[in-house]
Amino acid sequence: MAAPIRDVKSKRYHLLQTHGDSFVGSFEASPASVLWGELFTEKERNFLRHVLEEGNQSFGVRDTFQLDYRIAWNPTAKQQMQARGEIHDGKLVILIHGYSGRITDSWGWAKLVKPLWKQGFTVCLLDMPGFGRSSINLKWNAPLTSWQHVDSIVLSKFVEGMRFRSPVSFIGYRESCKTVLRLFRDSPHLVATQHALIDPIFTLDDVYPLEPPYGAISKEWLAEKPGKQAVEFDKFLGRSKTFLWTIFTGKSDTDSGREALQAVMRRRQHLSMRICVSHVTKEFISEARAGASGASSYAHVLFFCKYMKDKLSEFMAGGKAPKEIPPWALEVTSTTASSSIGSKSLPSVDSPAGRAKAFSALETVQEVAEVLSRCTTARQDSRPQSPVATKEASDGAPLHMEKHQKPAVGAGKSRPLLPALYANSTGFRDTVSLRETLRTDAAGSKGFRDRPAHALTKQKHRSEAALGMGMSRTRI
């Protein structure tokens, strides 16, 4: 029986000729199946369809490695690559999946592509050998043990093949964090200053193995070993001026990485300035299934809340990692203005975050408008009218307004004209207009510029005496 059409579209098949009539085949979830799931919004789906491209590299490290990747090029970096064959001033960030669990291919980082791309990065989602479409000697099912001992060399070869002159930033997940730290140790010239490790799984022996002298194994040497490894860790971070943001989501198999970092920071306390450790729950970072409903093949994606996406992209661009995750972080939503320019997001007014911060931009703007309108109305009432205007007002005809004068918003409300601080002032009618109590530029009111100099000086003294608070000027 033929497979349904939706099953055929949900998979993408690959055939590769090895030699003669021999072929090697594999399949994976198709991009259409992954992107058309409910996990991606319409804007994210259109962005990834137009920006995300596929590429591959082949090089030799004892064996022949074929590494596939997905990449979102920065427009400037892409132009330089097409014109010169290398990138001089572009920024590259490489995101590496885990080697176990669900996030084991490049689709796992799809939700981070857009925020990092907006920060000016060229975002590369790498498939390590044996995962995705990457292979060793044309074998897609290459075991992890066949290349893990040379993982840092493989990663350095890939970075050099990308032909970026500037150092590279990394974001690792689970076991790939060990590969990233080994690259820091072996090729510090390729490493930038900002890196993130999510749920790292490693030990100090994996990153900085120390062999004891022949016949010198003792309890004293074993007790001094973590301290020596911490010194090596400190040397690397100090030499390359690297900042690490490590994020733990509470998984039990990440205890080894947490204990290793605690051992290093306990013996080298000043490293707390370069290593930030954050503990979050699954509400902040979680693994989610991405795929169209009814599809037989799908992918798993790391899902980040809005706060974590913004902070992680800002940190990779050179910002600081938050020392503590605020309790209102899950309530952060992007406003229309902030999302249109790609700036920081603010908590919504109706959310618990907005109430906790007592932030209401709409109410603030309305209060300022009401104060200015009341001042304008009071000044108009105190201004002497010409005989013509008085006659028109007595006849019931509408008064003529000046060119730059606008009707008052709250003129008909019976509210105090100014706060209680100015309500008892004897010179209230002289200081009721804010425009007459400050010296503005050429954009000030017309009546202020037309008044003579001695009148302005006299008005200034009366205003200071009326306020009585040492406030000679008020800025709006």
Image: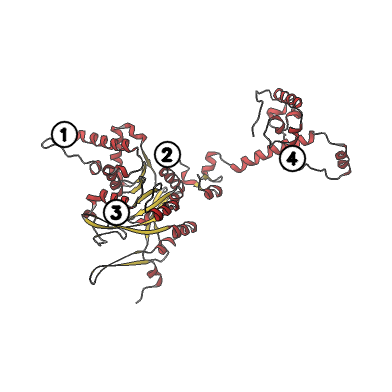
Mark 3 and mark 1: Cα distance apart in space: 34 Å
Q: Residues within 10 Å of mark 2 (few under 14, many from 20)?
A: some
Is 178 left, or right, of 121 in this rendering? left
Name the spot of residue 139 as percent of width and height, x first. 25, 62
Task: Classify mark 2: helix, strand or loop.
Answer: loop
Q: Which mark is residue 413?
A: 4
Q: Position of residue 44 (x, y in %)?
A: 47, 56
Q: Residue at x 75, y 28 (%)?
A: 430
Q: Amino acid at mark 3?
A: Ser
What type is the residue that disc 4 sits on?
Lys
Q: Position of residue 333 (x, y in %)?
A: 51, 48
Q: Which residue is mark 3?
A: 100
Q: Label 2 sits on what residue type?
A: Lys
Label 4 secondary element: loop
- Which residue in the structure is indicated by mark 1? 219
Q: Which residue is mark 2?
A: 320
